[in-house]
Image (cartoon, rainbow, N blue to C red):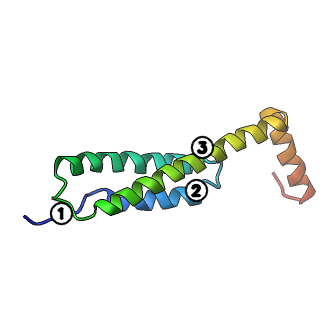
Amino acid sequence: MEQQKLPNVTIAIVLAILSFICCCFGGVPGLIMATIAFFLVRGDEKKLMANPDGYSNASTLKTAKILAIIGMVIGLLYFIYTIYSINQMGGWEGYMEKVNEMMEQYGVEQ
């Protein structure tokens, strides 16, 4: 019997790698992408368990799962750090005041 490729492995790896880049935007976009990648991998794991010899890219599936987990952890940590930073500035109002001060300092029009 000819071995097939698991259908979601490639997109899961792409999403997991993009989650590293998107973690710089407050953590949430990276967390969302990594979570989607993780659930795609979980679906393919079920297919692999049903037919272990029928798929040729099982090792790539493990790589995608590891990348997705790392992306979720980094995204979650960065999100927690962002919430903590905003809280230390006096909440959302304090954060917005700080942003407005910086915009005035650099001469950016609102």
Residue 69 % position (x, y): 48, 49
**Which quadrant of the structure image shows residue 76?**
top right
Horizontal relation, residue 100 to residue 45: left or right: right
Give the residue type at disc 3.
Answer: Leu
According to the picture, the residue beneath numbered tag 2 turns out to be 22
| Crowd around label 2: few <14 · some 14–19 · many ≥20 (10 Å) | many
Quarter of the figure with residue 14: bottom left
Q: Separation of disc 1 and disc 3 at Cα? A: 34 Å
Residue 28: give x, y in percent of width and height: 58, 45
Q: Secondary structure at mark 3?
A: helix
x and y percentages locating residue 48 in the rendered image: 23, 51
Query: Which circle's residue, 2 or 3, is located before the other in the chain?
Result: 2
Can residue 12 be seen in the rendering of this structure?
no
Answer with mark 1 or mark 2, whichever residue precedes in sequence: 1
Task: Work out whether residue 54 or residue 80 is closer to the camera in this orientation and state it.
Answer: 54
| Residue at point 71%, 43% (across, down) | 81
SS type, badge 2: helix
- Residue occupying image coordinates x 53% and y 47%: 72
Q: Check disc 2 and give the amino acid type.
A: Cys
Of the residues tagged 1 and 2, which is closer to the observer? 1
What distance separates the C-alpha of mark 2 from that of mark 3? 12 Å
Q: Quadrant of the N terminus?
A: bottom left
Q: Which residue is mark 3?
A: 76
Query: Residue tagged by mark 1?
Result: 4
Q: Nearer the viewer, residue 6 or 59?
A: 59
Q: Callout 3: 10 Å neighbours few (<14), some, many (20+)?
A: some
Q: Is residue 34 left or right of residue 92?
A: left
Q: Considering the numbered disc 1 on the image, is that residue within a helix, a strand or a loop?
A: loop
Asked if marks 2 and 3 touch (Cβ < 8 Å), the reply is: no
Q: Callout 1, which amino acid?
A: Gln
Structural crowding at the residue carrying mark 1, measured as other residues with C-alpha within 10 Å and reported as few (<14), some (14–19) or many (≥20): few
